[in-house]
Image (tube, grey):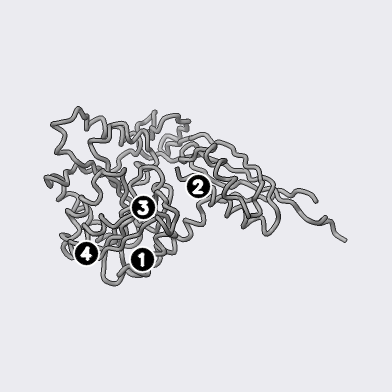
Amino acid sequence: MHRTKVKVVEEALDANNTIAQANRSDFDRAGVKVINFMSAPGAGKTTLLERVVADLPGVRVGVLEGDVQGSMDADRLASLHVPVIQLNTDPSFGGECHLDANMVRSAVPSLPLDDIDLLVIENVGNLVCPAEFKVGEDTRVMVTSVTEGEDKPLKYPLMFRACELVLVNKIDLLPHLEYDVERLLYNIDQVHPDVETILVSARTGEGIETWREWLLRLAAREGAVAAG
Amino acid sequence: MHELSLSSAVINTAVKHAEGRRVELVSLRIGRLRQVVPETLEFYFGFVARDTVCEGARLEYEIIDARLRCNPCAKEWDIEIPAFRCPTCGGSDVEIASGNEFEVESIEVEEAECIAPR
């Protein structure tokens, strides 16, 4: 018996990325643009989707809803008459705190890819893990809210750097908070220089038109876009 | 947090390259920019390795510092906090030279027979 050293030099998440690429190929073939939509729990992802998904002229939207348990978010979106598929990480996937490419692949057969132009994958509420796992998306968008603290970008740089767009939600609450929006935007810029940000309130509708226009531009983009 | 899935990914990679041989050691390179807690990874590694050729294997890792490079002015610098604008020119055309790795660098396996030529 003797030992041999085997050189590997392989990214540990290579297998996930390979499956993500397979998902991406399926989405590209069907001409569907895909957003991986992420945030901490309770930042307002579902509400921000409720505000726009049924109101994108010329763009048919579908949603893949990721949660550990339950179908509450899917039910909310289904009532807007957009196709919604619920993906629970518990029990089939051990109650994972994030979606990965394999989980999304399991849902692909159920997605009406021929009937939609834009798929929003609403990830599990979590600022850490989802940023590590590509699922086959064209782009990543995250939500932070003004009740979360201006130093969030410094604590979760990977998430803020992974995304092409950061929505800053709940700005209607600013009069009631000692919150410095400029400091948040400065911190976001330090962590992800020049990233696009939109200040929004899903409750009052402020900024929602800009969010809607961003989605329309995404749907109109030619070809595949690097997820980064 | 997700070190359970990460250790599964590490073990799957090691098992693939072991090609049926017993694994004694798995060596990782972990960049500071990746969200990996090495101690937690080690903790889960032992569990996930059970009933695989990695059972009983040691896990070792090298932590790689986060080093950034500004493309326009070619400045390189190490970061302790996540500040990605160039400290010299203030530009945003900055790339990560190192610190983004999460890779299985090598494994050590037990060869059952001497492989010297006959």
Q: Which labelled disc corresponds to residue A68? A: 3
Q: Which one is nearer the viewer's eye here, A176 or B86?
A: A176
Image x and y of residue B97, in percent: 49, 39
Q: Chain of mark 3?
A: A
The disc, 3 or 1, on the residue closer to the chain's N-terminal end is 1
Tell us which disc is closer to us: 3 or 1: 3
Type of amino acid under label 4: Val
- Residue A213 in view here: yes
For label 3, the SS is loop
**What residue sits right under mark 4 in the picture?**
A82
- Farthest residue toward the left? A204
Q: Which labelled disc corresponds to residue A28? A: 1
Q: Quadrant of residue B12?
A: bottom right
The reply to whether dot 4 and dot 2 touch (C-beta < 8 Å) is: no
Image x and y of residue A101, in percent: 43, 58
Q: Which one is nearer the viewer's eye here, A174 or A89?
A: A89
**What residue sits right under mark 2 in the picture?**
B4
Q: Are marks 4 and 2 on the same chain?
A: no
Q: Residue at x 56, y 41 (%)?
A: B43
